[in-house]
Image (spheres, rainbow, N blue to C red):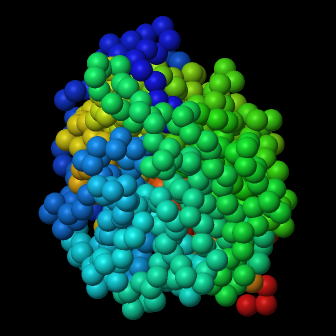
Amino acid sequence: MRFRLGLKVPGCSVALLLLACVGWGCSTSPESDPAEAGDKAAPAVEISSGSQQDGPVLQTVARFVDRAVDAGVDFRYRNGQEAGYYSIVESLGGGIGLLDLDRDGDIDLFVPGGGQFGPEQTIDGHPSGVFLNRGEWSFLPVATEAGTAGVASRYSHGAAVGDFDDDGFPDVLVTGYGGLVLWHNLGDGTFENATPGSGLDDTRWSSSAAWGDLNGDGHLDLYVAHYVDWSFENNPYCPSKKAGKQDICPPRQFRPLPDTLYLSDGDGSFQDASEAAGLVQQGASGKGLGVMMCDIDLDGDLDIYVCNDTVPNFLYRNDGRGNFREVAMQSGAAVSETGVPEGSMGVDLGDYNLDGRLDLWVTNYERESIALYRNDGPGMFRHVSHITGLTTIGGLFVGWGTSFLDFDLDGDEDVFVSNGHVIRHPSEAPLRQLPLLFENRQGRRFANVAPAAGDYLSSPHMGRGVARGDLDNDGDIDLVVCHTNEPVAVLENRTGRRGRHWLGVHLIGTAATTSRDAAGAIVTISVEGLPDQTRQVKSGTSYASSNGPRMTFGLGETSVVKRVEIRWPGGGTQLLGPVDGDQLLVVRQKVVGD
């Protein structure tokens, strides 16, 4: 999130947004098998895009509809800017947590509330919102009943979902300024503040976090990203380019704060193992924003990727015992194509070119390309934004939350990006910005189809965190987007099916060395007429957000999956198939001796 004045992409200008639209084909116009979903899509404009080198012209009908108002989700993240402090705290915004809090098979919402600044240099939090999914696009606000409504001592940002006590009910860690809050899901629809006595007494300003079993003991550990050392005493005056206007100071005005790695003791308490585990320490640390735990080198254990602001990103490679080596620079996933650190915010992992290797996608600040790091294996990445149609259009936006998703169920992963500026008075780029929906074109290029994908995607917003999940159990992927000082958007995917099918997979770890959440598990499916598809259970991702627990595979026009291969963390493989499409598979880990 490097703050710059003036939006000038090398060799082009803002006017290129229109040219980009031409070039990329934009237009202005209970865990049981659910019943087969019909095609509920409303008519939408068809968009054609392609070139001779892209192969045959592809047709796409993309449509998302914001259902928040009629679904009962009336909530907005508030950043407290009305107090006039121009604090950099105001710029980060909030995220979204998707979880099945009551285990009824429907995905519920947890939304941090943000905070406010008092007249005598005080900072307080707004309560988080909790919304229970009752099905049929109806959500019930239950924060009061859940016990979170009256507790908001800290200014909040992120929602990291994870079952830290392995009781089957997902818990939530809330990050923010002043410390962490650990909400323990009691399984009866209520949460208990489990922070006291947990060892999570970190008071440094935290942005995002991710849960995962880092040392193979079956318990969820925790990585917390910290940002910078802002305080009321360290809140310098920074002018904007617009005469006489104060503005939020850029991150270069502040020292970075080191991140923290907590190992679980297995009894609900945690120990700070940052230094012993090999994390970068004070003086050389990053200004952390997005965090992701995943098995990036496919060796059976969880690695950690951290988006840092204006300094190189981190890639911590795990030796399988919870000891880490920071290898982002030598792996090619730390900086821009020209070797420059960027203002990185959001992150996800997906196999965009269907070669079986998982690639990194990172959102960045304006005048910096979205970073697509292609996994060339083993453990090596190549920055390929310039050859996939991302460099120019990505440089026009301040990107935050992001997600790989096969929105049209054609068998490859597309990408959504939420955008919005961070300063009050940007000199050229708008404060509110358009979201981006990139359709994957045969694993070679991406086309932004957002302008024709409905009112929400064709309108500007103060976008921040994004989470994906199948909110209505119809097989396609919906989105929830958090904004700053703007209502949360709950986006129903109404993209036309055109005879396409899907398969949902929800993994549950049961081995002593595998957490219930199964982060790091890898699923590969084989379908007649399509390349094999590989997905991974990840933790964190996006920005300050947590996705729903299921993965979704698009099957194209094929209704049967020949083979499902599941590789569990720490070793062990399960094979299923053939499997009918248009259903959710709930797969429990098969342990030797069962």
Judge whether 559 appears above or below 137 on screen: above
Total numbered circles: 0
Identify which residue is drawn at 61% across, 73% down: 200
Identify which residue is drawn at 19% across, 41% down: 455
Q: Quadrant of residue 419?
A: top left
Judge whether 351 appears above or below 321 on screen: above
**584 or 154: nearer the viewer:** 154
- Residue 329 is left or right of residue 426, and the answer is right
- Residue 316 is left or right of residue 394, and the answer is right
Judge whether 90 appears above or below 48 on screen: below
Question: Can residue 261 be seen by looking at this rendering?
Answer: yes
- Residue 377, percent from left and from top: 78, 40
- Residue 546 is left or right of residue 228, and the answer is left
- Residue 256, percent from left and from top: 62, 44
**262 or 166: nearer the viewer:** 262
Identify which residue is drawn at 41% across, 33% down: 237
Question: Can residue 590 be seen by looking at this rendering?
Answer: no
- Residue 516, percent from left and from top: 62, 78
